[in-house]
Image (cartoon, grey):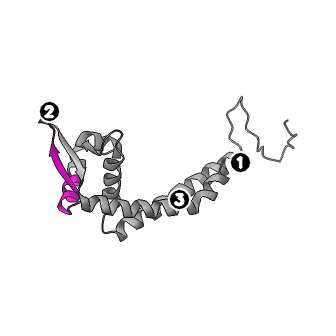
Amino acid sequence: MRRNVQKDEPSTAMSASTGQVSKEEFEAIANFRYAIRRFLRFSEQAARREGITPQQHHLLLAIKGFPGRDSATVSELADRLQMRQHSMVGLIDRTESQGLVRRVQGTVDRRQVFIMLTPEGEARLSKLTAQHRRELATMRETFLALR
C-alpha cells in the first residue's frame, strides 16, 4: 500500500518506475558498509598484532581456503586477492621469508608452482581465524538487523 506524500515531504518508498531508492534502503546499505568496515578494521589490526600484514593474512587464508586443495598457484592467488601477478610474487616472497609459506613445484606440469602454508603459517592462520570467529559472533546481531 502506498501512502500519500505531501508536496514538501520527501518520499521514502522506492518507485519501481523511476528507480528511486528509499531512505530505508540508503540506511540499510550504509549500515551494512559500516559493519563490513568495522570487521575489516578488526581483521587488519588482528593481523598486525600477529606480526603480519593484512595482505599476508589474506594470502594465508586464500591458500588454506582454496576450493578442493590446500595450495594454489601464483595466478590463482592473484585472482583471489585481485592483485597483479608481479605484485603477488612480491607478497609471496615476503611471506615466504617469514617462514609462513613455501613453494612446491607441480608434479604434473613441472612449470607450475604451488604455494602452500608451512606449519608456522598454519598456526598463525588458525590463531587469527579463531579471533575472527569470535568477532563475527559478536557482530552477529548487527548483521541480522540488516535483513
> In front here: 76 or 66?
66
SS category of the residue bearing label 2: loop
Which amino acid does the dot numbered 1 rest on?
A: Lys
Where on the picture, by quarter, is residue 114?
top left
Few, some or many C-alpha atoms within 10 Å of disc 3 (few <14, some 14-19, many ≥20)? Answer: some
Q: Which numbered circle lies on residue 136?
A: 3
User: What residue range appears in magenta?
Assistant: 90-110
User: CA gap, disc 1 to disc 2?
Assistant: 55 Å
Q: Which residue is mark 2?
A: 109
Which amino acid does the dot numbered 2 rest on?
A: Asp
User: CA gap, disc 2 to disc 3?
Assistant: 40 Å
Magenta run includes residue 104:
yes
Which amino acid does the dot numbered 3 rest on?
A: Leu
Q: Which residue is mark 1?
A: 23
Q: Position of residue 67 (x, y in %)?
A: 36, 40
Few, some or many C-alpha atoms within 10 Å of disc 2 (few <14, some 14-19, many ≥20)? Answer: few
Q: Earlier in the sequence, mark 2 or mark 3?
A: 2
User: CA gap, disc 3 to disc 1?
Assistant: 27 Å
SS category of the residue bearing label 1: helix
Q: Position of residue 143 (x, y in %)?
A: 61, 54
In this figure, what is the number of numbered marks?
A: 3
Evaluate whether residue 87 shows in this view.
Answer: no
Few, some or many C-alpha atoms within 10 Å of disc 1 (few <14, some 14-19, many ≥20)? Answer: some
